[in-house]
Image (cartoon, coloured by chain):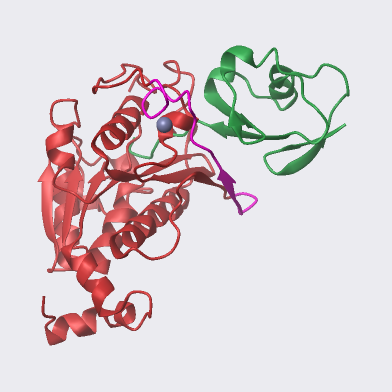
Chain colours: A red, B green
Amino acid sequence: MNFTDIQIERYSRHIILKDVGVEGQIKLLEGKVLVVGAGGLGSPAALYLAAAGVGTIGIIDNDVVDITNLQRQIIHTTPDINRPKVISAKEKIEKINPDVKVKTYHELLTTDNINDIFSEYDFILDGTDNFPTKFLINDACVLSGKSFSHGGIIKFDGQTMTYTPGNTCYRCVFNSPPPKGLVPSCSQAGVLGSVAGILGTIQATEALKYLTGIGELLTNRFLIFNALSMSFRSVHFNRNENCPVCGINPTITELKLEEMPVCDL
Amino acid sequence: MKIKVNGKDQSIQKNAVSISDLLKLNKVESIEMVSVQLNGNFIDKKIFDKISLKENDELDFLYFMGGGEK
Ligand SMILES: [Zn+2]
């Protein structure tokens, strides 16, 4: 592909990076990333992916913007209240960068649509808030050989890992969703808004690294941070041979949504 | 004896401290909300009671965390 003069200017701070350069920027412009959930994690992630010039960004979210979202979901603004999050997100992305093609899915991710949707993308960014969907994303990626970034936040804490085929998956670490009501959601326990920004931005960085093929991804390790002590820890996690989806004797061979919602919202 | 929990040194009683005991010591309310790695291997929750910790064991607790949609 050929860059226009305007593109060379727009992406000049990427292009002068030795590890990115023209080739890396072309990979980004040809890259396709799906952001699952235009919420606390998906908002900052989508904004940075857009600014970076990721050529195709998919956004899936069945929700509308609520006033309680605005404390951290920075892709949405006050006039967006009651509007579908995917529409609000698409408008912001297009304003930031007309190079980006945005595909919106105003629906829930389900066992029926997940494979069709995922097949259109190079990388999946999980910004969902519920465990059944988190496990579904993991299983779909493991079974179809797709890479994704997991992200989780609560209160002042965040965690993220990146899965690529052959490496530790989310189920290697967490066998199955927690019992209903045990793990509080952000609406129950609260979350510092900027913590979502830190985590979502790390996830976007992983997507950009994946597309350009630079650096070391967060594979086989979890990055865990606490904003109060402002400490980051990267913990190595080996693959689990008893993992129900990628272990020696997998019990999950087809997709199934495990009905254990994180809370009664 | 000394062990390492989440990268930090922790002193515990020498005798018969299981993973379950350690979780209680560290005020983890429920074993269902945490995943435990001992010296690089995941430990099945069913045997948290049965594993006695040894000097210099390294453990990592990893908690479930959702996203920020709601
Ligand atoms: Zn696995």
Say which of A170 and A186 sits in front. Answer: A170
Say whether residue A103 is left or right of residue B25: left
> With respect to residue A85, does A258 lie above or below?
above
The segment highlighted magenta reads A228-249
Residue sitting at x 15%, y 42%: A119
Q: Is residue A236 on the magenta stretch?
A: yes
Q: Position of residue A164 (x, y in %)?
A: 36, 46
- Residue B55 drawn at (x, y percent): 83, 32
Q: Where does the N terminus of chain A fall, quadrant-wise? A: bottom left
Magenta stretch: residue A127 in it?
no
How many numbered circles are shown?
0
One can see residue A106 in this view: no
Where residue A156 sits, quadrant-wise, is top right
In the picture, measured across the screen, residue A83 lies left or right of residue A240, that is left
Q: Residue furthest bottom?
A: A5
Q: Is residue B25 something one can see in this rendering?
A: yes
Q: Residue at x 49, y 30 (%)?
A: A240
Taking the image in four quarters, ligand 1 sits in the one at top left
| Residue B44 image offset from top left, x and y in percent | 56, 19
The C terminus of chain A lies in quadrant: top left
Viewer-proximal residue among A60 and A215: A215
Helix, strand or loop for the magenta stretch, by majority: loop
Indicate the position of residue A36 as horizontal and vertical percent values: 25, 42
Out of A177 and A264, give the one closest to the viewer: A177
Asked if residue A61 is positioned above or below residue A75 in the image, the reply reads above
Give the residue drawn at x 46%, y 30%: A172
